Amino acid sequence: DLETGKPHMGSKSGYGWMSGPAIKPIALRVVFELAQAVKIPIFAVGGITKGEDVIEYTMAGATAVQVCTQGIIEGAKAFGRIAKETNDWLDSHGYSSLDEIRGITIKYMKNIKENNYITVPPKVYLDKCVGCGICKVVCGYKAVEIENKKATINVDKCFGCGVCTSKCPTQALLIPR
């Protein structure tokens, strides 16, 4: 609350459960990635305020959605309104159920060859590498090995995050620009 500085929701200490539209882009991406990786139902949550949000999550691969914050803000009528908006959208676009659009984004994206995330692994400057192993310890992807007292990068495992380069005390690892 801009007037009082107090949180709108939550406990006396200010912690709450409200997420809302601010996290929707992140949650949509997570649903999209999960739907490609697992064969179990995916329940989407985060920023579902209207029927179009349900449609987007379903297109990204969600099996079902959960509505919380909007129900808190608007009351129980939010659930019926969102369901009606979802059905109205399906009807206006010629679909009879959510099953007809579930995962449609995944199917569309498989046809796109462009990779918008290019992994660039670091280059190892062997003359600077002292084989200390810090790079191996900090690599969350297990892409770094120490062989013959020198670091090597498995480019198939490396995500190009740069953590190893930031922790190397001799600057033996650098991501080429």
Image: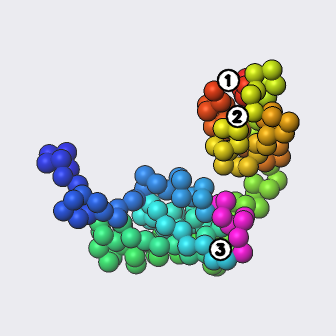
Asked if marks 1 and 3 touch (Cβ < 8 Å), the reply is: no
Which is in the foreground here, disc 1 or disc 3? 1
Which residue was labeled with disc 1? Answer: 170
Which residue was labeled with disc 3? Answer: 95
Front residue of this view, candidates 122 and 57: 122
Which is in the foreground here, disc 2 or disc 1? 2
Which residue was labeled with disc 2? Answer: 132
User: What numbered label is drawn on residue 118?
Assistant: none
Label 2 secondary element: loop
Residue 38 counted in the magenta span:
yes
Image x and y of residue 132, in percent = 70, 34
Q: Which residues are magenta?
A: 32-39
Kind of residue at badge 1: Thr
Mark 1 vs mark 3: which is more N-terminal?
Answer: 3
Q: Would residue 141 appear left or right of 64 to someone viewing this image?
A: right
At x 65%, y 60%, the residue is: 32
Q: Is residue 95 visible?
A: yes
Image x and y of residue 86, in percent = 52, 71
Asked if marks 3 and 2 touch (Cβ < 8 Å), the reply is: no
Image x and y of residue 109, in percent = 75, 54
